[in-house]
Image (tube, coloured by chain):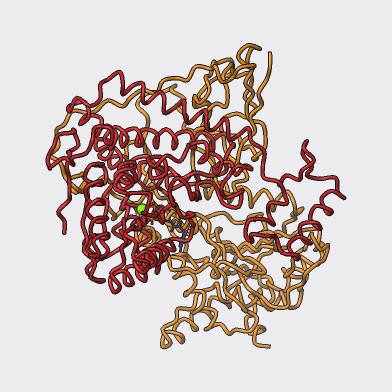
Amino acid sequence: MSNLEFPLPDIGEGVHEGEIVQWLIPEGGAVAEDDPVVEIMTDKATVEIPSPGTGVIAKHLFGAGEVANVGDVIFIISSDGAVADSPSSAPEVAEEEKPVSAPVVVEKTAPADLPAVTRREDGKVLAAPATRRLARELGVDLTTIRGSGPNGRIRPEDVRTQQSAPPAVPTTPTAPTAPAAVVPTFAATSGAHEEERTPFRGIRRKTAEAMSRSKFTAPHFSLIEEVDCTDLVDIRNRAKVASEKYGIKVTYMPYIMKAAAIALMEYPQLNAMLDEEAQEVVVKKYVNLGIAVDTPNGLMVPVVKDVHLKGLLQISAELAEVAGRAREGKAKAEDFQGSTFTISNAGNIGGILATPIINFPEVAIMGVHSMRKMPRCIGDDIVARQIMNLSISIDHRLVDGADGARFMVRMRELLEDPALMLL
Amino acid sequence: MSDLLQIIDREGNKVGTVPRVKKEVFLNMYRAMVRTRAFDDRCMKLQRTGKVGFSVPNRGIEAVSVGAAAALDISKDWVAPHYRDFGIMLYHGVSPERMMDTMFGNEADSAVGRQMPVHFSFRKPLNFLSISSPLGTQVPQAVGIAMAMKTRGEDGAVLTTFGDGSTSASGFHSGMNWAGVFNSPTVFLCQNNQWAISCPSEQQTKSSSYAIKGEAYGVPGVRVDGNDVLAMYRAVSQAVKRARAGDGPTLIEAVTFRMGGHSTSDDPTKYVDPELVTYWEQRDPIVRFSAFLHAEGILNEAADATLREEAKDEMLTAARAAEAKPVPVLTSVFEDVFEETPAHLKKQSAFCVDHYSSRGEGVNEKGEFPL
Ligand SMILES: Cc1ncc(C[n+]2csc(CCOP(=O)(O)OP(=O)(O)O)c2C)c(N)n1
Ligand SMILES: [Mg+2]
């Protein structure tokens, strides 16, 4: 017996890894040289790998769905001595000639008579790699788009149009976007225990990687603070009217952002990152705020820069602008870059507290939760107040609990008495 | 301009005047097409098994290269090629083993391992300029060679080939313009295979065809069914004849379809409609020409089957031979450019050998320094 080990080659230019899509020959199955053995998907292409020799597939070293690095042995062929000694005597499998299909169509020089296909039966969509990349960046699912190109091919414009279709990115915790009502359908039969399997890749996998890296690298601790926003509601209502003449709509988010910028300048250890390679703590002396929002296309984090230098009106305008650009699919890469601290308002959908996961390598993320009228004690009286929770998750490697608590107390002070922000 | 020169239709029926050539020429063309496909198939398998780094699928365009090649007289005509042109070399007797030497970049490689796989260059048996990756650069080079032929009073012609996408490169425009103004004996062959990687023709040009672009330079243009090897042969023969007669350049647009990916790094199923592929499969240049040859009594089933088998074996044997050859020696890096290696390169060569030997790296059984 002799064994031939097959290392995964670089099947594109500069490919580093490949995912096993499926084995075309099972372990124990016979192969002749050139027979397709396995289908591999790289970030460039999905290809069939032909057998480098004749024999029996002794072992698959990776299962379907697993990712192998270039150079990893992915399967082993064992061949008996006779065949191994003279591989050139291996019978070439005769290639089947394609049947010449019966002539029906009158000769045309261009396939103008082809029907315009919009969706392929196998569920694949037609789109150039640049279009796919745009869709990935904008979090658009290509299978939901109708392509306007020839034969239903999806063009970049289609992706952008689709991206601008979903409702506005919510920028205020009090104006949650109501998710479309889901009409429940009850299966007529029971006990089928149906399951659906979809490949774990694309945006979902990227998000998963980022979340795991954050959660498994940074030991998180979380704190919750309650904020009485009664005064803020009043001030904001007046600001809303006053800012109308500038054509700017002031929401609550700019106040939270302004307060965060002030508090972060005072507690800069929360506005930092750990440069692990250099083994240095990098404290940022400027505040760029990432605003994490839930959209039908997934999580997006547009960034408003230099919030510490800007007034409420400007913050409002810029937030509306970056969020708008992201919505319309006109966002530039830099709209999503450079944040030093992130605020998440996913809580506007529901839930009164959260333990958000840090937007790594930042050191903290703050969650903003829904504002509700609640009974509270003022002196000995029970009065109705506008109550909102703020949560924060912090990387305990760089920040201790006491500092986190001080920061949150400062946030509360600033939001309960917004006039302090003028100081 | 939308007229398409066609001699045999997709079932192999005659719809135009068949060129009057010997039976052997037909057979040579057919064999070259079958061998081109076999060479292409073998290269794809070599790449997928990690034996060569890269290849460029030629499936579907065999008639373009072979029909054009057959119209050349390689004792005087030159070729400034595109990378998707295996058929030109194979038709004119470049051995598959020499081509495989380039695919592997071994010590016998005519480019001595300096080039990527597929970037062939040969002086014999034909003058086949080195394929270069930057698109369209071969076009003004072809015009320059043709001008030299004209200046010397020779009656050679230069065939330059390029893709539909390459018509957007500056070389195409400067070359065409020169050729038009100075009446250079150049044949411009645009292989319109409908794609420039994933960019389709409708995003490549607003012109109604590629052939019509000749008008801007005063160069006559013709559109040819690129899957009809006889039509290709006829169009290129006429263009070569015009060139030899001093009547100047011609632009030929060969309408065909790239049946594989752009290269081994590409996945065409991401952007090519499978119905389009089916449409073009029914217009396969080899199937069509085979039907014609059968109908004309030039080829029978048995001979056809043998020829195909032989082509596959030939390519496998060539690949094994090339694979078995060692890589070029390190010192060859410093050779070739100058007839006699100048002192400074000798010094660098010695330094390099010293450096690697001091690290105990790179010596083969022969005591040479492989790359
Ligand atoms: C000047 C230049 N621009 C871009 C590229 C990248 N590139 C390599 S091949 C290719 C597509 C060329 O298409 P086409 O001319 O139609 O030839 P085909 O590949 O279809 O045979 C491109 C854009 C290049 N090599 N050179
Ligand atoms: Mg092309």
B185 and A127: which is toward the camera? B185
- Can you see residue B168? no
Q: In this rendering, would A4 be left or right of B294?
A: right
Residue B67: x and y, percent? 29, 44
Whether residue B250 is situated above or below residue B122 in the rendered picture: below
Residue B284: x and y, percent? 28, 36
Whether residue A358 is situated above or below residue B74 in the rendered picture: below
- Can you see residue A187? yes
B187 and A302: which is toward the camera? B187
B238 and A361: which is toward the camera? B238
Q: Residue at x 64, y 21 (%)?
A: A59
In the displayed image of the protein, which residue is found farthest to the right? B358
Q: What is chain B's hue in the picture?
A: red
Residue A283: x and y, percent? 77, 72
Q: Residue at x 34, y 41 (%)?
A: B62
Q: Residue at x 34, y 36 (%)?
A: B33
Specify the quadrant of the image occupied by residue A383: bottom right
Residue B248: x and y, percent? 26, 65
Q: In this rendering, would A263 be left or right of A128?
A: right
> Looking at the figure, which quarter contains the C terminus of chain A?
bottom right
Specify the quadrant of the image occupied by residue B289: top left
Q: Quadrant of ligand 1?
A: bottom left
> Looking at the figure, which quarter contains the N terminus of chain A?
top right
- Letter of the chain in orange: A
The mark total stands at 0
Whether residue A83 is situated above or below residue A116 in the rendered picture: above
